[in-house]
Image: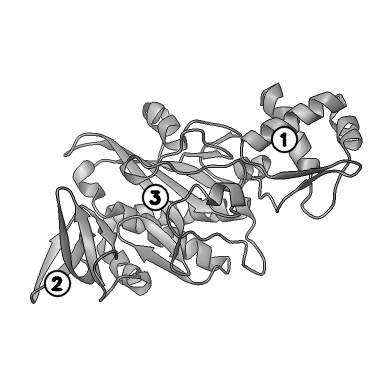
Amino acid sequence: MNEHWDKKAQIIGLLDHTEFISGEIIAQQVGLSRTAVNNHIAQLETYGVDIFSVKGKGYKLAKQLPIFDKSKLVNNIENRCFYFHEIESTNAFMLQHADELKNGDICIAEYQSAGRGRRGRQWVSPYGQHVYASLFWRLNQGMNAAMGLSLVVACSIVTSLKAFGVDGLGVKWPNDIYRDNKKLAGILIELSGHSIDECHLVIGFGINMSMSEQHAEQIDQPWSDLTSLNSMPDKTELLTAIHKQLKIDLMQFEAEGMEPFTSQWQEYDLFYDKQINLLMAPNNVTGTCKGIDKQGAVLLEHNGVITSYIGGEISLRGSE
């Protein structure tokens, strides 16, 4: 850990969301001048950390900041765990090092400066507030064998969240997880290699834990996080559980394909039997969603005919 983040991490560890702490006490605890503390606080705010500053009282977090426990991550995850306070993109890091990785290796970050969603969208990634992670997996059967994989990953994450008491969960084909009908998590799978033999998969996922007001304003769709739960899951324990579940489900997917996961997907499918638009450039397809097939393609019924589609994105806009 470099000096830049060493001191910031120490300062964050002293901040609380219920009581103020003076700049003088922080300076004494971390071995910095008051000016240096002020500078670090100002820099943390540029990373998306909401901090109240009141003259005569000191500093206080605007809301709880769920930070990973690095030592627990490294000790409890069986595979290599790459942890960063700051990185451009966890997916990009894993793709760059794919030749050196083994199945189950994972990259985790507190902040992404260039986080990406599907179709090149930005994934808002303020420091410490959410889960940003990418898991590596090598498929010996090639890219064609990866069809439906994002649905399996969504099922894994739903299973893990449910085990931590998260309710109101649902899934949206092909790669989104919702809570109370608002987006909670997203999945971005990137592949490199060949269609018929070995290929590398990087499975990126982001989960909203504790959204700040300033970053909520940057999101152009209804969103959800976990702050309304009676007890928010410990982020380190949640990530560790997701990692374990992903490995179990990915091995089953390799051995048996998509079929074992279709019933679980349908249980949480928010759009089953609903009229939807499937956005597929240059044209859109409208029909009634009939779930997925054994390859993970979405099924649409139109004029009594059911057709499967492997590309596109579901939208309700203009379909109701």
Q: Nearer the viewer, residue 8 or 246?
A: 8
- Distance from disc 1 to disc 2, alpha carbons, whole Å, reads 53 Å
Residue position marked by numbered label 3 in the rendering? 187
Please tell me which residue is depicted at 72% across the width and 50% down the height of the picture.
Answer: 62
Please tell me which residue is depicted at 36% across the width and 27% down the height of the picture.
Answer: 99
Kind of element beneath mark 2:
strand
Q: Nearer the viewer, residue 124 or 8?
A: 124
Q: What is the three-letter code of the residue carrying label 1? A: Ala
Q: Earlier in the sequence, mark 3 or mark 1?
A: 1
Q: Earlier in the sequence, mark 2 or mark 3?
A: 3
- Distance from disc 3 to disc 1, alpha carbons, whole Å, reads 28 Å
Frontmost of labels 2 and 3 is 2
Residue position marked by numbered label 2 in the rendering? 301
| Residue 136 point in image, percent of width and height | 40, 40
Q: Quadrant of residue 256?
A: bottom left
Q: Earlier in the sequence, mark 1 or mark 2?
A: 1
- Give the class, few, some or many, for how many residues have Cα within 10 Å of label 3's Cα (few <14, many ≥20): many
